[in-house]
Each structure stands twice: as C-alpha cells, then as structure tokens.
Image (cartoon, rainbow, N blue to C red):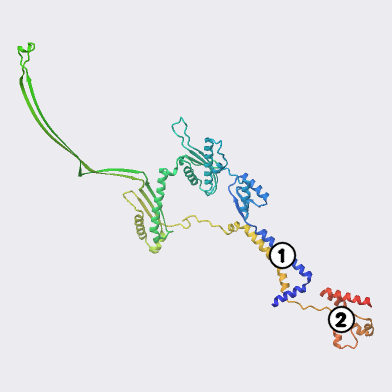
Amino acid sequence: MPEQIQSIISNLRGFGVRRLALMGGIAALIMAVIGIASVYLNRPAYETLYVGLDRSDVNQIGLVLGEAGIGFDVGADNTSVLVPAGTTAQARMLLAEKGLPTSANAGYELFDNVGSLGLTSFMQQITRVRALEGEIARTIQSISGIKAARVHIVMSERANFRRDEQQPSASVVIRYAGIDAEKSAMSIRHLVAAAVPGLSADKVTVLDSNGNLLAAGDDPSNTSAARTLGVEQTVEAQIGDNIRRALTPYLGPDNFRASVKADVNTDTRQTEETIFDPESRVERSVQSVRANENSNQKQASTPASVEQNLPETQATSTDGPQTSSANDRKEEITNYEINSKKIATVSNGYTVTKMSIAVVVNQDRLKTILGKDATPEQIAKRVADIQKMVSSATGFDDKRGDVIDVSAVEFIDGLDGEPVQQAGILDSIGQYTGTLINAGAFIVVVFLVAFFGLRPMASALTAKATPAIAGPNFDEVQRSLPTPEVTASVEPSVAIGALPGARPGSTPLDDLRQKIRPAPQDRLARMVDINEERTAQILRKWAAQEVAA
C-alpha cells in the first residue's frame, strides 16, 4: 500500500472509537449542509404552464394545483401560471381532468355538445356563427403580442320582402402588449374578411381593450394618398442609395450627407389610339347588278257611228297606234376596307415630375484629399465635380425643373446620429442580482465548510503517525514508587537530592537518571493522558494484588 494510505490508516486507528465517531458526525453534518444549501440555492426553474388567462382561471388553477401538491407561481402580469420544471405535463393532465382553463372562445367543439334531434335551422345557424367566432378569436390570439381577442360577426340575412341583401360585418376587440397596434389591426381585418364569406375588410372594425378605435371604414393603405406617399418614399430612398454608392468610395461614408425630395405622379392613365393606313386597302365586297327591259304597247279604237246605238249590233274596231321599247342596264359596286390599328395602353406606374437634391460634403475631407494648402478655388472645383457625379447618379433633368445643390461645410463631431446608450456594468449586474447572490452564498457556504471542517480533517488524516509511547507495566510502576525500606536506608542528604525509588550502590549514571525522572504522581498523570484504558487495567491489577495479599 502507498505510504500516504498507510499513514491515514494508522492515524485512524490511533484516533480511537470516540474520535472516529465524532469525525463521522462532522462529515455527515458537512455533507448535509452542502446538500441543503445546493438544493435551496439551486431550486429548479419554473416553466410557463398557461398564459393569457383570466383572473378566475388563475384562481381555480391555483386551487387545483395546491390540492394536488404541485408548486406553482403566478406571473407579474397576473395572467400566466408557472410550475417547476418537469411537472408541466402532470399539471396539464390534472387541469384537463378538471376542465381548466375554461375558454370563453368556444370553437367547432360546440357541435360536439349539440344534439341533432329537436335542433331548428335557427339554432344551427347561431351555433355555426358562435363556432366561427371562436375559431377566428383563437387564430387572432396566436399572433405574437395579442393576449386576448373577442370576435362578433353579423352574417348576411335576406328577408322575404326585402330587395337588397344585408352585407355581413364584424367587430373585433383585442388586448395586446409590445406590438404596433395599427399594423396588427390591419392584418386582423384582412384575416376576418377572408374567414367570413362575403365579408370585405372595410366592414370589419377593430378596437382595443381600452376602447380605442384602431381600424374602421375604408382601408387607408389602398387610398391614392397613401400609395403616392409610399412611392415617393421608395423613389427617394433609391435615389439616396445611388448617391451613397457613388460618393462612398471617394469621400467615405461619414463625410457627406444627402437629402432627396421627389414629386411623384401616380395617377392611373389609359390611352386608346386608332391608326388608319390609306395606302393599304383590301376589297371587302363586290356587288354586280344587271337589268334587261323590253316593252310593246298597242292601242285599238272604235269609230263613233249610228251602229253603236242599234241593239244587237257589234261594232268593229279599228287598229290604233302601236309603240315598243327595249332597256338594258348593268351596275357594279365594290367596297374596300382601309387598314387600321388600335392601341390601348393602361399605366398604373408613376412618373417623377420634379426632384430636389441637397448634398453636403465635409470640408476637412476635401482638404485632406487636395492637401493642406488647398485654395478655395480648388475646393469649389472639386465640389463642382462632385455635383456632376451626383447628377449622373440620380438622373438629373433640367427640363423637368430638377434642383441640385452641393456644398462643402465643416461637420460637427457627435451629430451624425444619436449614440446608442449601451447598458452599463451596474445595469448588467442589476439584471442578474438574484443569480449572483445565490452563487455567492453557495460559494461562501462551501468555503466555510471546507475551511473549518474538511481542512482540519484532511490534515489530521494525512499527518505522519507519532510513535505511540508504550505504557509501563505493573512491575515498572511498582518499582518506581517509593518503599519504606529504601527511604530509611538512604542518607538524608542523598534522600533529599535523589528521587524516590533510587537504589543504593547504583552508578553515577543511574543516579543522574533517577534525578531527572519525574515524580511518580506526574508519571501516573502522564500515563492516564496517554492511554486511559491501559492505566485503568494497571490500577485494577494492582488493586487485585493488594487484596490478594
């Protein structure tokens, strides 16, 4: 075995039963203190069980978890419940058995509790609307930042004696935190409009829990003013980016500033154009008419005489004048189609009507480029060159009335932008105060336990074993005690200087040893300190011999 282990074993044997028991108790106490401190200071983190709960749901969930012996905590907003890590599944199963949390937004599960017998069409329609409202409210709550939502829908209804059908409408009330309410309201309007048949976004009204109107009526994002403003911002940003790309390699990103104002026309234009080509003609139709006419006319006349007045007398007629005619007609009509082209153009884009550009350049940068001895004329010439560069990059047009101005000025340090305040050391420490306190307390406890408990114990175990002083046996103790015979035979002068128990006729070395030996009472006390059990055995043996004598 190694020498160190042998030293530890020998020290443990020399301690005795009482000291070993005491050391074991101290070790158990130290381990208990460390265990309790570690458990208390490193308690398990809490996990979120439910969020966005009503006050009644929080109270009922707290009662159920307390009865089940599951620890819980309520969030600072009083709408969330937290449980220790690892107990989330158990807590949710327990609450599901109790029907918690109770959701006011019932969805299509309403049909699970509705019987088919005795259910009128009106009840079916109402249940369908309620289910649709609940499903839409659940979808809205899934949006980041929306804590709660409630939806009311009015479906279209057409009466028997009403000609026009009532259009559907909806209203939504939301409770939010940490989001842009107006943007979320516009998204919610389109969500509700897409979920309800026949519902348009301008028929959806959105409010917050404080009664503030977030969105109602026509969608402002579809107005011409909003579209024009958006196009202008896009054009200005694009032109400014062109200026930055052109000047950054030459001046650097921090040595110039550009501002652009663009007037944009976003009117919708429709152009229709018809073009005729007289040089190109095509026969469309040809019509030919032919007519031949022949006519003969003959007239007979009866002469006036006496015979006409006699009965049963037939007068003879004589031939009169005769006429004949012939007519031949031919007609041809040809229709020609002239070539034409129709062009219809619809434009939904934009045109830039006017543009104003202002660029300021850091004068110190120009002096650095041109040299310290640069004259104002040189600086003005360089500014003119920069103006030409900006004109080319932005599409400057004099006919359109564009304005551009480039100036060289001295920049003021620290005004480029508001500096972002970074969190200081104290703020960072404040965020983790609780964690730092727990860690410091645990370190102090471990240090104290190690310094006052483990360190002395380790020193005692690793110390080198001291050779044990063998206790005197009974004969040696009896010889060391003074006897009457020896005391009487010794001369007074010798008896005073010698120790009790000195024998006559001894050598000077023996006499010196006798002189330096301690008194019997001291030796007996030392024996008791060294080994109590062995001294007790010697005394008991001594007493037994005296009794036997």
Choose top left, top right, bottom left or bottom right for residue 38: bottom right
Against 515, is 329 above or below?
above
**Tag on residue 476?**
2
Label 2's element?
A: helix
Q: Earlier in the sequence, mark 2 or mark 1?
A: 1
Residue under numbered circle 1: 30
In the rendered structure, the answer to whether residue 445 lies left or right of residue 334 reads right
- Left or right side of 157 for 72: right
Height in image: 528 above or below 315?
Answer: below
Q: Quadrant of the C terminus?
A: bottom right
Q: Nearer the viewer, residue 259 or 235?
A: 235
Where in the figure is residue 532, as x and y percent of width and height? 83, 73
Nearer to us in this view, 41 or 338: 338
- Give the number of marks: 2
Query: Measured along the vertical axis of the image, is residue 324 above or below residue 531?
Result: above
Residue 439 in the image: state x and y as whole percent: 64, 61
Would residue 19 be found to the left or right of residue 420 on screen? Answer: right
Mark 2, other Cα within 10 Å: few <14 / some 14–19 / many ≥20? few
- Residue type, label 2: Glu
